[in-house]
Structures are given as structure tokens and as C-alpha cells.
Image: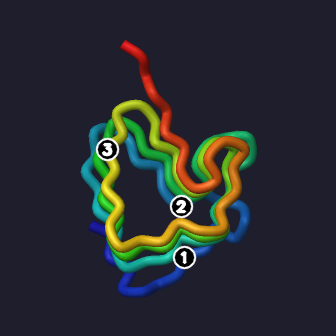
Amino acid sequence: MIDGSGLTVSGGGAFRHFVITEKSEVTIRNISLENGFVAGAHGGSIVISDSVLVLTHVTLRNNTGTNGGAMRLASGAQVTILHSLITENTGAVGGGINAACTRN
């Protein structure tokens, strides 16, 4: 678990905050993730695949990524968002969240 205790973390307009993969189970709470950026890729703040993520009292603000300005949910991602704010993010497809789907 990551508890930011009210901290604001900036990517400085140059970095993504988290990449969550490999069947991880992650809880992030009480934090603001701002100014994340990834050029020509997905999820300016968070990318998650094949994992479980719970966001509680999290603000995702002013992040930029191609698909999913704030967050990209790739194959196998399971996300729960509680009491959180996703605002002022920019992406070509999904300014806040972009969810990839697979067809059966």
C-alpha cells in the first residue's frame, strides 16, 4: 500500500508516476499525482496491466499521455476508484482514463 498522507507528487511534465504489472495488487491512497507525462505512449500518470489497483482519496490532475491522459487500463487490469478526482488530464483517446478491451 502507498499512503501519500496528503502529499502531491509531480512528474514535472517529464515522467509517468507508476507502471503496475505482473499480477500485482496495489492500493494507493491520500495522494495527488500531477503533471505526469509520457510522449507517444499511454497513461501519463499510471499504466496498469494484469494487476489489481485500488485508488482511494487520490487526485489525478494535469497528466498527459496518448491514450489515457491520467491512466491507461491495459489487458487484465482491474481498477476500483473511490472518493477520488480525475481532472484536467489530456489524451488523444481518453483524457482521463483509457481502457483497452480484448475480444473473445
Q: Mark 1 or 3 closer to N-term?
A: 1
Q: Which residue is mark 3?
A: 78
Q: Which residue is mark 1?
A: 9
Disc 3 crowd, CA 10 A, few/some/many (<14, 14-19, 20+): some
Q: Residue placed at 54% from the left, 43% from the top?
A: 98
In the rendered image, the quadrant that contains the N terminus is bottom left
Residue 42 placement, left or right of 51: right
What kind of element bears circle 3?
strand
Nearer-the-camera pick, 82 or 10: 82
Q: Are marks 1 and 2 in contact (CB under 8 Å)?
A: yes
What residue occupies the far bottom of the structure in this picture?
Answer: 6
Q: Position of residue 15 (x, y in %)?
A: 65, 59
Task: For marks 1 and 2, give the CA distance.
Answer: 8 Å
Q: Residue placed at 43% from the left, 22% from the top?
A: 102
Q: Which residue is mark 2?
A: 17
The correct choice, above or below, for 3 with respect to 72 in the image is below
Nearer-the-camera pick, 11 or 86: 86
What residue occupies the far top of the structure in this picture?
Answer: 104
In the rendered image, the quadrant that contains the C terminus is top left
Q: Are marks 1 and 3 in contact (CB under 8 Å)?
A: no
The correct choice, above or below, for 76 with respect to 32 in the image is above
Mark 2: amino acid: His
The part of the image, by quadrant, that contains residue 35 is bottom right
Mark 1: amino acid: Val
The correct choice, above or below, for 87 with respect to 54 in the image is below
Q: Nearer the viewer, mark 1 or mark 3?
A: 3
Q: How is the image coloured?
A: rainbow
What kind of element bears circle 1?
strand
